[in-house]
Amino acid sequence: MNVRFSQRELLDLAVAWLALGVAFALFFGGGGRALLARPDALLGLLPTSLLTAGLGFLLHELAHKVAAVRFGQLAEFRADYGMLFLAVAGALAGFLFAAPGAVYHRGRATLRENGLIAVAGPLTNVALGLLFVALELLSGGTLASVASLGVRINFLLAGFNMIPFGPLDGNTVEEWSTTAFLGVGLPCFGLAAWALFGFSLP
């Protein structure tokens, strides 16, 4: 299996990574009011957000791409610059809506294969979130804080992407199999709710 990236794709991935890093830093830092009141705190969150949100985003999209290529598809990520702007603007206002783009693939694929390509992304975020849980439990100080943010971001990404609406992964999975959607979606929604309401940053 040969996974290649075009220059345009690498640029779109880099821009989406940066925009999501800024959006998540603003959101977890309290939004626009916090930006005015505590700009140093938000600047301190940015590198961590770029690492955790960036890693979660990149691996999510890479999982889609690898799965698509595995099924004989031509696949490439394209950023949605309008949605990236909305993500940053929303985070400034205190809410987060992250839909940075998508991996577009073409070629013959069954409904099952499309479903498996779609579910690969959220499952990757769940796996990465669990790795961050282990890191948080086994570490302390700054590293534990970074891991805590990684848990929240990846579980939120998993839950959001499993919503059965529009171009989101959950819609494709539900079209393939209601059983698969419930089996993956319900745990993802539960983890996302826990990440959002169940605990706070150290």
Image (cartoon, rainbow, N blue to C red):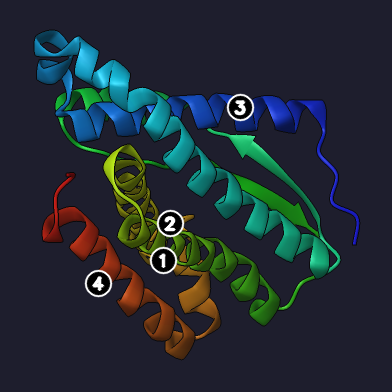
All told, the count of numbered labels is 4
Q: Residue 196 carries which label?
A: none
User: Residue visible at 33% across and 77% down?
Assistant: 187
User: Residue visible at 9% across and 17% down?
Assistant: 33
User: Residue visible at 82% across and 33% down?
Assistant: 6
Q: Which of 133 and 155 is in front in this view?
A: 133
Estimate how packed mark 2 is, as few (under 14), some (14 to 19) or many (20 or more) residues with alpha carbons within 10 Å. Answer: few
Query: Considering only order in the chain, which callout, 1 or 3, is on the residue closer to the N terminus?
Result: 3
Secondary structure category for the residue under label 2: loop
- The residues bearing labels 3 and 2 have C-alpha atoms spaced at a distance of 25 Å
Image position, residue 162 (x, y; %):
40, 65
- The residues bearing labels 3 and 1 have C-alpha atoms spaced at a distance of 25 Å
Secondary structure category for the residue under label 4: helix
- Pointer 2 with pointer 1, Cβ within 8 A: no
Is residue 83 visible in the rendered structure shown here?
A: no
Vertical placement of residue 20 versus 152, above or below: above
Which quarter shows the C terminus? top left
Estimate how packed mark 1 is, as few (under 14), some (14 to 19) or many (20 or more) residues with alpha carbons within 10 Å. Answer: some
- The residues bearing labels 4 and 2 have C-alpha atoms spaced at a distance of 21 Å
- The residues bearing labels 2 and 1 have C-alpha atoms spaced at a distance of 27 Å
Report the residue marked by disc 4: 190
Query: Considering only order in the chain, which callout, 2 or 4, is on the residue closer to the N terminus?
Result: 2
- The residues bearing labels 3 and 4 have C-alpha atoms spaced at a distance of 30 Å
Secondary structure category for the residue under label 1: helix
Report the residue marked by disc 2: 166
Q: Which of 86 and 30 is in front in this view?
A: 30
Mark 1 or 4, closer to the camera: 1
Report the residue marked by disc 3: 14
Report the residue marked by disc 1: 130
